[in-house]
């Protein structure tokens, strides 16, 4: 029944879009000099370099210029300009992420449902979302399942990050930003140029950032309880080898000194508190290192080959107050090491002017070792209870996509991927998780004329499951999967001053891995044990759009938004495992609507120009985390106001800016007191982490 309803929705919407495009579009040369944003932007959403306007995938492309102009300092900030992308973070090394309500990840020991890729390399953990944007060239957010080309764990979509690559001309940029009231600063630079002209080029980027944050701890006397210090260095070498081969070597190192999850006691979701009165200072340190090498070369007159090898490592150590309250109950510590090795081989073949294929192979090994302890401060002698867990995951896949131009204005894309995953898990008990999955995608693109394209697609995405520790009633939990049905359009006006991307979608989401929970331990006298589990089924549908409008040569407006309904339709698996009902059919921290709106006005001043910018970012109400069977905390909707004034002359740029100008109060994350009481702990209230307050600063940049 769901399948039929989805196909009817897609067919109706595609017909409507086709009719609208036929009536309104005008024919112009697509290579005209005044091309619009989506005509100019090149993306790699299908593992090929293509114009954004031609790709039958919903894609938001954020350039390095946009990152800097909007004061985006971490990858997760792009959620502010991406319809359907929802990211929350309550710690330096954690992020909760979903796209269109799909792929929600609340803990970093659950495989992410939205894939993160840097220069084509899969990042196994969402903590990368908190990494700096210093060396980033472009970020593409692909919405809907991308499993056919990008692999498992992309059932919600993929975030594809491209870093700045070496050049054969000497170029560089230095930038410095400072803002108050939390002593926020960023200093960084990048330089690129030839080592052997025409043969070998290099690039080096380095930077540091720091902030005190907006959370204090009056119990310990700290006004920088949510501080962050991050240093990064990244280098690249590119060799133009014989035979038209290009070899690119990338290496990086990031050091993060911040906090773990940090919450203040609050009486409710509208009682905004910034005082985290914990008995111990929250500490979280992460060291990221990695290296990858990529080979691009033609292997015949019609086939190009890409080979990619990578190694990434994350080391972490942290400590915190385990109960987040001034009651001295627990002191918690953790440490770990995550290593990922991967290899990918692709062949892109053009068989004729109308038919081509992309075929590839992928393999990966991931080891994760974690140690944690809780010191019982309320027990004489303060005994410590320790736990360890390590896992070894082997993944391999084969995939292929065929591109067929049935007619000059009609393209059919058919893709299929087979993924195999095996995870060996060791702790106080040993267990194993295995999965084999087929992930197809079919897309039909119709170009109405030079300005208007419409498309429809059907795709399946899958995320791997995992295992739980001792005492869990479910030693393993299954992966979840989604069928997504989508129709969309990309169009521009005849004068190219207006562009629009829009899509309607329906998601049939099965075996949803929801928020973690507590369940009665199977060990006699074990009380409750924390577990990951499958909640049940979810149905999601909605519409999204983003646009660019040049009202005059000096005045432009950009914006986007999403309206969706994502609801749990069957929670029987959650009830079977925990013995409790869910208090709501909503997914935690997921809004029904988001929007962003930005306007820029440029005024010539002397030999330079002055740009006045202002904008809004809004998010609808969300439910917080709860283990109550009857109550789910509702977090208010909010709208943030941002503004800046920028003066540019030659290679120099000076800006003053204000983020959250009106000092809107909101919660980034929220945990209801029931989470503590169900575990048998005393609760002085609920726990909330506020979002950033007003930050006012200056930015100076110089390019050469």
Image (cartoon, helix red, strand yellow):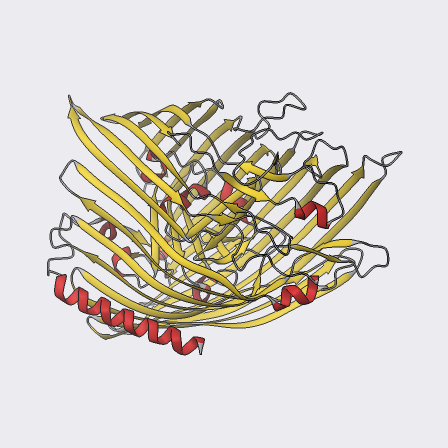
Q: In this view, does 201 lie to the left or right of 105?
A: left
Height in image: 320 above or below 452? Answer: above
Extreme right residue here? Answer: 380
Q: Is residue 363 left or right of residue 249?
A: right
Residue 64 seen from this side: no
- x%, y% of residue 676? 70, 45
Q: Which residue is drawn at 30% across and 61% down?
A: 55
Task: State the residue in front, 403 or 662.
Answer: 662
Extreme front residue here? Answer: 630
Task: State the residue in front, 204 or 398.
Answer: 398
Q: Quadrant of the C terminus?
A: top left
- x%, y% of residue 58? 34, 59
- x%, y% of residue 498? 18, 50
Q: In which quarter of the image is the N terminus?
A: bottom left
Q: Which residue is drawn at 43% across and 57% down?
A: 100
Residue 34 seen from this side: yes
Q: State which quadrant residue 612 falls in.
A: top left
Q: In this view, does 160 lie to the left or right of 373?
A: left
Q: Residue at x 19, y 72 (%)?
A: 408
Task: State the residue in front, 578 or 101.
Answer: 578
Height in image: 71 above or below 407? Answer: above
Q: In this view, does 626 lie to the left or right of 623?
A: right
- x%, y% of residue 62? 34, 45
- Count up the numbered dots: 0
Q: State which quadrant residue 562 falls in.
A: bottom left
């Amino acid at each position: 029944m769901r399948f039929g309803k989805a196909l009817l929705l897609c067919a109706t919407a595609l017909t409507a879009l086709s009719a609208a495009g036929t009536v309104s579009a005008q024919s112009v040369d697509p290579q005209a000099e005044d091309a619009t944003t989506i005509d100019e932007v090149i993306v790699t959403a299908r593992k090929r370099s293509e114009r954004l306007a031609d790709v039958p995938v919903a894609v938001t492309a954020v350039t390095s210029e946009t990152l800097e102009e909007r004061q985006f300092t971490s990858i997760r900030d792009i959620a502010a300009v991406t319809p359907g992308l929802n990211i929350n973070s309550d710690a330096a090394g954690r992020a909760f992420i979903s796209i269109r309500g799909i792929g929600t990840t609340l803990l970093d020991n659950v495989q992410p449902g939205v894939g993160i890729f840097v220069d084509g390399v899969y990042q196994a953990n969402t903590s990368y979302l908190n990494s700096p944007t210093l060396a980033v060239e472009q970020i593409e957010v692909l919405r809907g399942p991308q499993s056919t080309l990008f692999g498992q764990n992309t059932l919600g979509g993929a975030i594809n990050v491209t870093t700045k690559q070496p050049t054969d001309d000497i170029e560089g940029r230095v930038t410095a930003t400072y803002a108050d009231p939390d002593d926020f600063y960023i200093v960084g630079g990048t330089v690129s140029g030839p080592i052997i002209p025409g043969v070998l080029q290099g690039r080096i980027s380095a930077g540091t950032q720091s902030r005190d944050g907006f959370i204090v701890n009056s119990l310990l006397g700290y006004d920088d309880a949510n501080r962050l210090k991050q240093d990064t260095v990244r280098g690249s070498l590119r060799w133009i080898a014989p035979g038209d081969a290009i070899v690119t070597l990338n290496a990086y190192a990031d050091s993060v000194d911040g906090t773990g999850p940090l919450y203040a006691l609050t009486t409710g979701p509208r009682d905004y508190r910034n005082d985290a009165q914990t008995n111990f200072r929250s500490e979280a340190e992460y060291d990221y290192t990695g290296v990858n090498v990529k080979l691009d070369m033609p292997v015949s007159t019609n086939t190009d080959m890409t080979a990619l090898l990578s190694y990434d490592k994350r080391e972490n150590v942290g400590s915190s107050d385990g109960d987040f309250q001034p009651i001295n109950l627990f002191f918690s510590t953790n440490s770990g090491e995550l290593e990922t090795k991967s290899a990918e081989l692709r062949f892109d073949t053009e068989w004729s002017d109308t038919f081509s294929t992309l075929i590839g192979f992928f393999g990966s090994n991931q080891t994760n070792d974690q140690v944690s302890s809780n010191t019982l401060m309320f027990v004489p002698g303060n005994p410590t209870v320790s736990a360890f867990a390590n896992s070894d995951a082997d993944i391999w896949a084969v995939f292929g996509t065929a591109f067929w131009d049935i007619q000059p204005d009609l393209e059919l894309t058919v893709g299929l991927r087979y993924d195999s995953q095996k995870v060996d898990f060791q702790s106080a008990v040993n267990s194993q998780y295995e999965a084999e999955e087929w992930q197809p995608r079919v897309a039909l693109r119709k170009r109405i004329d030079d300005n208007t394209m419409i498309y429809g697609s059907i795709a399946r995405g899958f995320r791997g499951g995992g295992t739980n520790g001792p005492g869990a009633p479910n030693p393993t939990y299954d992966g979840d999967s989604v069928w997504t049905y989508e129709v969309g359009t990309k169009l521009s006006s005849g004068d190219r001053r207006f562009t629009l991307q829009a899509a309607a979608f329906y998601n049939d989401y099965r075996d949803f891995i929801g928020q973690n929970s507590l369940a009665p331990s199977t060990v006699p006298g074990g009380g409750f044990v924390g577990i990951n589990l499958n909640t049940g089924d979810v149905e999601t549908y909605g519409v999204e759009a983003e646009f660019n409008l040049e009202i005059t040569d000096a005045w432009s407006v950009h914006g986007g938004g999403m309206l969706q309904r994502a609801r749990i339709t069957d929670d029987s698996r959650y009830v079977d495992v925990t013995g409790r009902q869910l208090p709501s059919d909503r997914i935690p921290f997921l809004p029904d609507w988001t929007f962003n709106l930005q306007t820029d006005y440029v005024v010539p001043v002397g030999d330079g120009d002055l740009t006045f910018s202002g904008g809004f970012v809004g998010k609808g109400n969300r439910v917080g985390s709860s283990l109550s069977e009857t109550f789910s905390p509702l977090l208010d909707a909010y709208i943030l106001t941002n503004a800046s004034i920028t003066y540019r002359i030659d290679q120099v740029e000076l800006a003053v800016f204000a983020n959250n100008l009106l000092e809107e109060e909101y919660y980034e994350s929220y945990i209801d007191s029931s989470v503590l009481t169900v575990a048998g702990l005393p609760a002085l209230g609920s726990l909330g982490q506020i979002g950033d307050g007003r930050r006012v600063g200056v930015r100076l940049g110089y390019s050469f």
